[in-house]
Image (cartoon, rainbow, N blue to C red):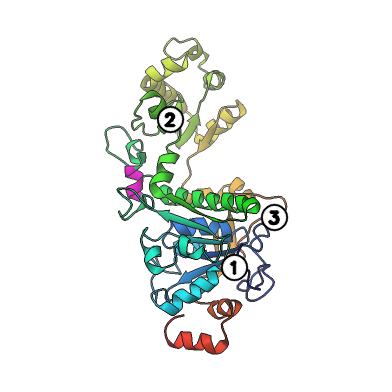
Amino acid sequence: MAQRATHDTTGTGDAARPASGGPASTALNGLRVLDLTRVRSGPTCVRQLADWGADVIKIEAPDDKAQLGGPRSGPDFQNLHRNKRSLTLNLKTDEGVEAFRKLADTADVIVENFRPDVKTRLGIDYDTLSKTNAGLVYASISGFGQDGPLAKRPGFDQIAQGMGGLMSITGKPGEGPMRVGIPIADLCAGLFAAQAILIALIERQGSGQGQWVQTSLLQAQVFMLDFQAARFLMDGDVPKQAGNNHPTSIPTGVFQTSDGYMNLAVAGQEIWKRFARALDRPDWIEDERFAAAQSRSDNRDALNKEIEAVTIGRTTAEWIDTMNEAGVPAGEINDIGQVFENPQVHHLGLAQPVNSQERGETRLVGQPILMSRTPSHIASPPPLAGQHSEDILREIGYSDDSIAAMKAQGIT
């Protein structure tokens, strides 16, 4: 197990957090995480740990003026790097690597998303660090895996969306492949890495041993194909683009109303019957073209046309009320501004206030998980680069004179 330095992870001491209303959560209190990540997949992983109260130390180069993915003041950086401390270290120097190794001996978790060979070249790979910290959980996120024929390719979300099959099933038939509107391979890889870390920490409670956990954008994207992948693996069915139509649940899709559009999800025979009655078309229940799931699939276009001939006669709000009263899933199609005006989104507290050091009072997206005893909140904004360097170096035994010398040499 790691030798723990004496440091405050409760959020009550100045060294533990920037000035805030306390820890982000008590759920992961006492857990120390070293964050070597950049861009999105890695920071997404680490954010899950920071938001639940881990003492996350973001390791940054002293001269890193521009973060990949945008400036520190940008919405992207602000949303990804809250609830952390920052230590600047030049890992291209022997002294910087030595300081990192000392810090690694106090850590429970390290997360990195370098290209696969970089950590070994720097001498901060799992095999090296676990020799002096047997309990270390070391998480690596890459584009395509740590080894194999494509391991050295540079990874990027849209590349993974294409290689992982998602773009082949997104968009309208005949209009070519289409990416989705968020970096879903990055985000899912980060979430899976966080899950892997927590699994490894639970296992460590029994074994006393850490381990190296790995995922990649490609693995995450293929896994997220879910039932579409199962259709191929089990039945040899290669799914195609279906636009807004659900590939197997019919009728499910986007339908025009008198003042816009709405989503309908008519899944299963019982909901189909409720839907037909709600549209005042009970005759569809017995119509041989639409009576069974397979016949609705065979006649999807005709059915959709008949549905829209009815739905265009009333407003979206009227239809949503009608459908939900009938027990048929239906919903608005909001832009992002409308999302955060939605009363249920307000109720769930997804937009949380924070006093950004660069932007002042603003809001960020909070965790989508509610906990009855150990809730999460945004306790502190993203740190300034190196904001906590002196505190962290003191925690691992460096004197004020040593820290001053490191600063003068550009090590921190």
Mark sitting earlier along the chain (3/2): 2
Q: Which residues are magenta?
A: 158-163
* Residue 357 visible in the current orientation: no
Q: Which mark is residue 401?
A: none
Residue type marked 3: Thr
Q: Quadrant of residue 174?
A: top left
User: Which residue bears the numbered disc 3?
Assistant: 374
Query: Which dot, 3 or 2, sits closer to the camera?
Result: 2
* Residue 24 visible in the current orientation: yes
Asked whether 306 or 244 is in front, the reply is: 244
Secondary structure found at label 3: loop
Asked whether 97 or 207 is in front, the reply is: 207
Asked whether 124 or 279 is in front, the reply is: 124
Q: Are marks 2 and 1 in contact (CB under 8 Å)?
A: no
Query: Residue 394, how many percent across, how many down?
Result: 59, 80
Instruction: Kindly report the secondary structure that dominates the magenta region of the rendered protein.
Output: helix
Residue type marked 1: Ser
User: Which residue bears the numbered disc 2?
Assistant: 230
Residue type marked 2: Ala
Alpha carbons under labels 3 and 1: distance apart: 17 Å
